[in-house]
């Protein structure tokens, strides 16, 4: 791919955050790092986009948070997926996969 994809498609950041948090509790910066790691370092999420999305998802009840200590002994807010968040992740994943299939079909038309 050459260049890293710096801009996440609009509407996908919430889905990526929900997926990252579904794999285990993470502090904010850990969410960013997990998305980068899973994408093979191809996706880079900007902190300026990440934190408003975390707060929004928490306000919507998709994730919950509690204070803990990070690996470098600093106080950090850890996020976990709620039942509502798990349902949303499942629903959004289905929508994403359907749309990717449709776009793939369109792009392969000759």
Image (cartoon, grey):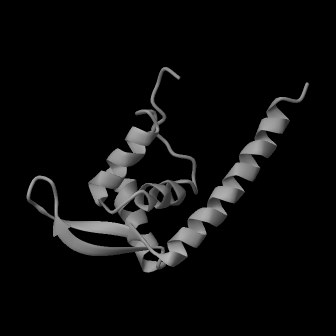
- Name the residue located 41 percent from the left edge and 46 percent from the top edge: 35
Residue 70 horizontal/vertical position (percent): 16, 59
Residue 19 horizontal/vertical position (percent): 49, 56
Residue 55 horizontal/vertical position (percent): 38, 71
Is 12 situated above or below 90? Answer: above
Question: In which quadrant of the rendered view does residue 6 lie?
Answer: top left
Relative side of 102 to 69, left or right: right
Is 59 situated above or below 12? Answer: below
Give whichever of 23, 57 is nearer the camera.
Answer: 23
Relative side of 37 to 98, left or right: left
Quarter of the figure that contains the C terminus: top right
Asked if residue 44 shows in the view, the reply is: no
- Name the residue located 21 percent from the left edge and 73 percent from the top edge: 67
Question: In which quadrant of the rendered view does residue 77 lie?
Answer: bottom left
- Name the residue located 42 percent from the left edge and 56 percent from the top edge: 23
* Outermost top residue: 2
């Amino acid at each position: 791919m050459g260049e890293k994809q710096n801009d996440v498609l609009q509407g996908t950041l919430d889905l990526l955050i929900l997926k990252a948090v579904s794999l285990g509790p993470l502090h904010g910066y850990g969410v960013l790092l997990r998305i980068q790691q899973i994408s093979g370092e191809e996706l880079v999420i900007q902190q300026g986009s990440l934190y408003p999305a975390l707060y929004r998802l928490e306000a919507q009840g998709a994730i919950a948070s509690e204070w803990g200590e990070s690996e470098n002994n600093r106080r950090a807010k850890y996020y976990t997926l709620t039942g509502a968040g798990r349902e949303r992740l499942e629903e959004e994943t289905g929508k994403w996969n359907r749309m990717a299939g449709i776009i793939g079909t369109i792009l392969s038309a000759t």
